[in-house]
Image (cartoon, rainbow, N blue to C red):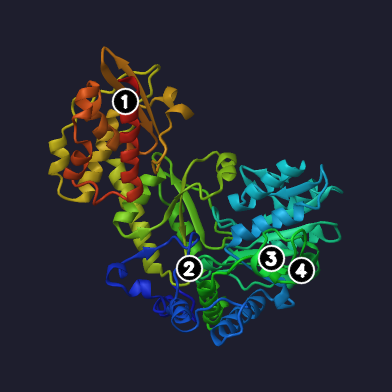
Amino acid sequence: MSSCNYSPEDFRRSFPLFQQPENRALVYLDNAATTQRPAAVIDAIADFYRHSNANTHRSSHRLARRATELVEETRAQAAAFLNARTSREVIFCRGATEALNLLANSLCAGLCEGDEIVLSTIEHHANLVPWQMMAQRYGLKLRYVPHIAGVPEFDRLEEVLNERTRIVSLTGGSNALGLRPDLAAIARQLRGRALHWIVDGSQLAAHEVIDVQATGCDFFVCSAHKFYGPTGVGLLYGREALLAAMPPWQGGGEMIAEVGLYHSEYAGLPHRFEAGTSSLGSLAGLNAAFAFLRQQDRSAMAAHEQSLVQRLHRELAQMPHLRLLSQPQHNLGIVAFAPVDGAPADLAHWLDERDIAVRVGNHCAQPLSRAAGVGATLRASVAGYTTWQDCEAFLHAVGEFQRVSATIPAENTAVAGWRDDDLSALRIERLAAQRSWQDRYRELMRWSQSIAPKPEIRRPGYLVRGCESEAWLAHRQVGGRHLFAVDSDSRVVKGLAALLLSQIHGRSGEEIASLDLEGVFADLGLKQHLSQSRSNGFYALLAQALRFTELKG
């Protein structure tokens, strides 16, 4: 299941993580969050610190000259990677988030109250929050591309453009849905307008060859760790004339030419936007990442990734009780879906126990989730080293989870008012007797049936911070006894909550204080099978319950 000119297995051999004994069976489908690093990148970082470590520009000695040459060589390679006109158009940042904050602060400083910024509902929070902050600071107005259930209709972009539009900042590819907007069509709608167009290319750079000149954008941002490079470094491209007219965002270090007591002169491009010492080891790794990608057949790699994402959508669409949020058309390599009945986090945990790495949550795209009328989703994202065997393992595990879930009775019906849950049938001995993690998982899901839905406690004041899935815990005290009510969308979280309440519900404060609750959890052997985040969820529930008992006395 790969392009005739492309072998994901050969590509995979360049990545040391997959060669480690503990990772040889790993199915890594969390590439939209971060890709793995090839040996060339890892070696380049280590080589810099072994042989060339020194600060740049500020010294004339041999090591400093070598470090400076490395940085400027990397900048030239970055310009080629983006097809910028000159390396002066490339600014190094810590990542796309910092690049977007730089643009927001520098560009908005010259705007007038009432000027407008156009965004879309599928933007990453990093392309929303900085503009919201600037809108509040300068009295600017935010407008959004028309959308249907959160999915923007970019062909209607012109409907929100007017003479006050000054900035249009849009994703080049949604990290939540994989949707790739037609950038050429957007460019046609923006042509001839007095505004700045920014493209967040964080998801784009790993899957397509970037050509900022052909795209026609004014600014482009991306993070190296999304395209097989190191963390802690990213790129900001800007047209040279526009960058030269922008005020710096941060001060100090290499961004100055001369400093006086009351006034300073700023350095020229690109250094005026690079205050302080850059992550030099990461820049060495970035240089190696550019060389590594030049050696690849990017078109064949993209064709392979597209074949995977197309077939994944077809296979998942045939599975019952799943709601697909993503579409295979114009998709960079992401499948996003949620179980119709149940929490995506439960499925993600099941996959983790199969050594299948995916991501669950709102993916830093909460406005999209709300507009689409969904909560958390499960996201599987492919890369050049993803094989169809990986995808088959993923699909098999999803189907297995559905079959196990089908054996658990349907959730109890919600009742009006807060009624104590009946936990009398729960037996810790039965849970402890389960020998495999699958059997313990099933038992916890059965225990979840003891927790009735309680919509009346789903309020911010009862929300438990720290749970992988949302959970709510309420408390009251009657006759010196502490009574609790809990609810969650996750069956496993509800099962863990039932475990907790079976030990503390109806007891006095002194009785609860005398219990070794963490020891109970450890003795049951659950800790080794539950993810850190889900274990933390149990402890978050425990901490909240203990706070209630301490407050009430």
Q: Quick one: SS at disc 1?
A: helix
| Mark pair 4, 1: CA separation | 60 Å
Kind of residue indicated by mark 2: Ala
Task: Look at the image and tell me whether residue 390 can be seen.
Answer: yes
Q: In this view, does 321 lie to the left or right of 369?
A: left
| Mark pair 3, 2: CA separation | 32 Å
Q: Earlier in the sequence, mark 4 or mark 2?
A: 4
Q: In which quarter of the image is residue 444?
A: top left
In the rendered image, the quadrant that contains the N terminus is bottom left
Kind of residue indicated by mark 3: Phe
**10 Å neighbourhood of mark 2: few (<14), some, or many (≥20)?**
many
Q: Quick one: SS at disc 4?
A: loop
On the image, numbered disc 1 is attached to which residue?
Answer: 550
On the image, numbered disc 4 is attached to which residue?
Answer: 239
In the rendered image, the quadrant that contains the C terminus is top left
On the image, numbered disc 3 is attached to which residue?
Answer: 273
